[in-house]
């Protein structure tokens, strides 16, 4: 009961209150900001699975986001696939790339894995930039069709908002089930001590590859949404700095915490918009906010431990209702 | 079913020029409590790592209940029913006691993302039930919700054993379980381990506390410089001239006889 009320309030907020408020203040620009936040929320939630929960610091997430965006854009512009096909295709192609690249790299640990993914991200970026015949290089791909339902409603800012919101909520649901379950416990064990996890019978390499694959799938989905909602993509959207931005979002929100990942995306995207009046100084303020967050809240705004406890209590995710321990699946 | 649960035959492990384990043969009987002792650097922990698949064997073979372990990975060895604890406590500090112990249950009951996505409730219930059983055996139910980092050193020892028990092992390998405990805690731990053994668990343990080993173990294997130099009852081993020499060669106070006296 409690669970239904909590979920209901969240859904009302995302699907009724927020779009209503945005329409009331006159739309367009703020709809595009919230759409971007939605796309980044999917991206941060997916990065959080691999970096926060499984503990593999990925510095190449923007590269996989880029693969998803280019897959969707090329399928839509060259083969005229509709959005309902390009979206899953982008996710699956990105996941396939991710799993292929994870096979050798997930055997690396700590900083070595981080540097390897940094290299992967750069390779993907440079490929998008220089394979002019296929990706049109620095010119990017333009005139990517927006998200519309044939005959029902045409592509519009509010339509894009709802499409992104629906997919973001669905992604949160899937990623939530993966992390807030015994499977999530197994991933956290890999993060805490992978040798010890192996001694307890966990197939650590397989778990790492799986979590990387899932993370890449949702990064690809985010990329497809980005391509279709903005209508234009170029390699500049998928640079190392985007990977770092995603990392900053999940650290500010609380490494390992799914709601934290969303909150991090909201804060680090809203701040620069709100601070537009102070011009170029705004990035200094954003940097200061990040710095102070880490200084005073090293576990992030919504740290993993309290969030897990709240989820188990509030949403009835625990088997043991009196002690709020364990997970219901 | 044979009476031997673990059989180690002519196992060697070479690290570059160093022969850490040199042609070691030994066994653990079903339900038996076996101690492995030896001076520092004798190769005891390396031998544990060879059994549990953490380090590959250079030559020889290891068999567990008629299954050859020699080329299995550590998670496969664990799933067959060999659980271990570590020399330097390795609990997962950011997870609750319950979640720590659930890892052991997951290792044995399976951990597939599909189960998480298209949940079968029975599986989650089974993991939860197994976890509670292990917590109960180790007397940690009251602390189940605590973060492992907040437990005392002594309790963490029990947490590590509870996690191993959640795997439903047939052989439990303990690497220096009594290290860092005071006399009362050591006695309690010995009692607990004896209880597990009486419930049918086979045990192999490394320990420096000679009293602990001599009182608890039914049989003791002694290692020095990678080789097995003695194997027998605590009483016989503590009088073995080869053992005395190995210990006196390092430090007098390490003499098993003296410590056990």
Image: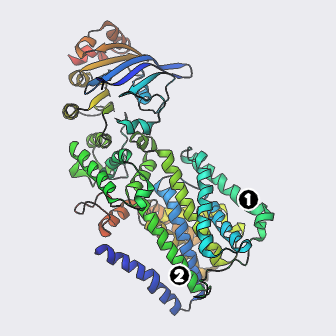
Image location of residue B52, percent across then percent down: 41, 32
In terms of depth relative to the viewer, which is nearer, B77 or A84?
A84
Instruction: Give the vertical position of A3 relative to B161 (above or below).
Output: below
Q: Residue furthest right?
A: A133
Spatial CA distance of label 2 from label 1 is 33 Å
Q: Quadrant of residue B48?
A: top left
In terms of depth relative to the viewer, which is nearer, B225 or A2?
A2
Image location of residue A66, percent across then percent down: 65, 64
Label 2 belongs to which residue? A162
Q: Residues within 10 Å of mark 1 (few under 14, many from 20)?
A: some
Q: Is residue B103 visible?
A: yes
Q: Residue at x 40, y 39 (%)?
A: A199
Q: Quadrant of residue A244?
A: bottom right
In terms of depth relative to the viewer, which is nearer, B47 or A283?
B47
Q: Residue at x 58, y 48 (%)?
A: A113
Q: Quadrant of the C terminus of chain A?
A: bottom left
Q: Quadrant of residue B5?
A: top left
Which of discs 2 and 1 lies nearer the camera? The answer is 2
- Disc assigned to residue A126: 1
């Amino acid at each position: 009961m409690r669970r239904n009320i909590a979920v209901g309030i969240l859904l009302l907020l995302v699907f009724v209150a927020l779009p209503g408020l945005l329409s009331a203040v006159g739309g367009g620009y703020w709809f595009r900001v919230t759409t971007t936040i939605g796309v980044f929320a999917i991206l941060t939630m997916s990065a959080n699975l691999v970096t926060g929960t499984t503990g593999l610091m990925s510095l190449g997430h923007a590269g996989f986001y880029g693969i998803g965006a280019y897959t969707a854009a090329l399928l839509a512009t060259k083969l005229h696939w509709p959005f309902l096909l390009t979206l899953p295709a982008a996710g699956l192609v990105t996941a396939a790339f991710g799993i292929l690249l994870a096979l050798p790299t997930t055997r690396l640990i700590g900083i070595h894995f981080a540097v390897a993914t940094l290299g992967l991200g750069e390779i993907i970026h440079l490929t998008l930039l220089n394979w002019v015949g296929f990706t049109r290089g620095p010119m990017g791909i333009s005139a990517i069709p927006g998200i519309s339902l044939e005959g029902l409603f045409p592509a519009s800012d509010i339509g894009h908002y709802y499409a992104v919101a629906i997919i973001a909520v669905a992604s949160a649901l899937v990623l939530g089930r993966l992390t807030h379950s015994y499977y999530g416990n197994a991933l956290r064990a890999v993060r805490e001590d992978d040798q010890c996890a192996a001694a307890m019978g966990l197939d650590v390499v397989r778990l790492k590859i799986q979590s990387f694959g899932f993370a890449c799938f949702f990064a690809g989905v985010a990329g497809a949404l980005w391509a279709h909602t903005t209508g234009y993509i170029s390699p500049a959207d998928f640079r190392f700095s985007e990977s770092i931005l995603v990392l900053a979002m999940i650290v500010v929100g609380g490494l390992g915490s799914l709601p934290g990942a969303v909150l991090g995306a909201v804060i680090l995207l809203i701040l620069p918009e709100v601070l537009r009046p102070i011009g170029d100084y705004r990035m200094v303020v954003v940097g200061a906010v990040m710095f102070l967050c880490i200084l005073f809240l090293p576990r992030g705004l919504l740290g993993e431990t309290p969030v897990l406890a709240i989820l188990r209590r509030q949403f009835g995710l625990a088997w043991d209702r009196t002690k709020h321990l364990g997970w219901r699946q | 079913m044979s009476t031997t649960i673990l059989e180690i035959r002519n196992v060697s492990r070479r690290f570059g020029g160093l022969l850490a384990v040199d042609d070691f043969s030994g066994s653990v009987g079903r339900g038996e409590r076996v101690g492995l002792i030896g001076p520092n650097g004798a190769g005891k922990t390396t031998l544990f790592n060879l059994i549990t698949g953490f380090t590959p064997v250079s030559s020889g073979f290891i068999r567990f209940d008629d299954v050859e372990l020699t080329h299995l990975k550590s998670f496969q060895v664990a799933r067959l029913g060999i659980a271990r604890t570590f020399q330097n406590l390795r609990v997962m500090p950011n997870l609750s006691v319950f979640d720590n112990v659930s890892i052991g249950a997951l290792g044995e009951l399976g951990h597939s993302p599909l189960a998480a996505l298209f949940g079968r409730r029975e599986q989650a219930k089974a993991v939860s039930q197994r976890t509670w059983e292990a917590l109960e055996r180790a007397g940690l139910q009251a602390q189940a919700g605590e973060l492992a980092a907040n437990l005392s050193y002594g309790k963490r020892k029990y947490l590590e054993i509870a996690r191993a028990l959640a795997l439903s092992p047939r052989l439990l390998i303990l690497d220096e379980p009594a290290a860092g405990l005071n006399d009362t805690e050591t006695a309690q731990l010995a009692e607990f381990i004896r209880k597990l053994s009486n419930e049918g668990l086979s045990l192999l343990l490394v320990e420096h506390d000679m009293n602990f080993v001599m009182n608890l173990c039914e049989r003791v294997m002694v290692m020095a410089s990678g080789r097995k130099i003695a194997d027998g009852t605590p009483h016989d081993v503590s009088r073995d001239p080869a053992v005395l020499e190995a210990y006196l060669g390092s430090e007098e106070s390490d003499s098993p006889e003296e410590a056990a006296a």
